[in-house]
Image (spheres, rainbow, N blue to C red):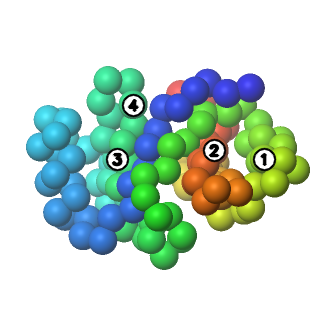
Amino acid sequence: MTAGLKTVIYPVGDLARAKALFSALLQVEPYADSAYYVGFKDAGQDVGLDPNGHAKGMTGPVPYWHVTDIRTRLAALLEAGAQTLEDVHDVGGGRLIASVKDADGNLIGLMEDTEVA
């Protein structure tokens, strides 16, 4: 089961420039601001900037489906023919992410929050 698409991560080459652009677009300051990730919250959505995204195989923005059991959903996607792009791993704060590529080259992200806020 999913809770829908709530997060989009953009791979960026110049984090400072991308941060300025998204600050201007969203008219909010980032809630997370580090050398490896900048995150914004706006209208119930998370928008993330990943300066290492291209190195991880991200070819454009990746939508992340919020799920209750990331390992089960990942296994189902792989069974259906997807290829692992990024295996399940913890990115901090009890948040797990993974991503796959479908047969058409589209990227699909999965995200599970294991800690209750």
Which x, y percent locates residue 35? Answer: 32, 67
Q: Nearer the viewer, residue 15 or 84?
A: 84
Which x, y percent locates residue 102? Answer: 68, 54
Q: Which mark is residue 110?
A: 2
Tell me: 79 left or right of 34: right
Under mark 2, the amino acid is Leu
Under mark 1, the amino acid is Leu
Q: Which residue appears farthest toward the front when viewing the image?
A: 104
Label 3 secondary element: strand
Q: CA distance from mark 4 to mark 1?
A: 24 Å
Name the residue carrying label 3: 39
Name the residue carrying label 1: 77
Under mark 4, the amino acid is Gln
Q: Is tag 2's residue or tag 4's residue first in the polypeptide sequence?
A: 4
Q: CA distance from mark 3 to mark 1?
A: 27 Å
Under mark 3, the amino acid is Gly
Q: Are marks 3 and 1 in contact (CB under 8 Å)?
A: no
Name the residue carrying label 4: 45
Q: CA distance from mark 2 to mark 4?
A: 15 Å
Q: CA distance from mark 2 to mark 3?
A: 17 Å
At x 60%, y 34%, the residue is 66
Q: Is tag 3's residue or tag 4's residue first in the polypeptide sequence?
A: 3
Q: Is tag 4's residue or tag 1's residue first in the polypeptide sequence?
A: 4
Which x, y percent locates residue 65? Answer: 59, 37
At x 36%, y 67%, the residue is 51
Q: CA distance from mark 3 to mark 4?
A: 10 Å
Sort mark 1 into few (<14), some (14-19) or many (20+) by Cα contacts within 10 Å.
Answer: some
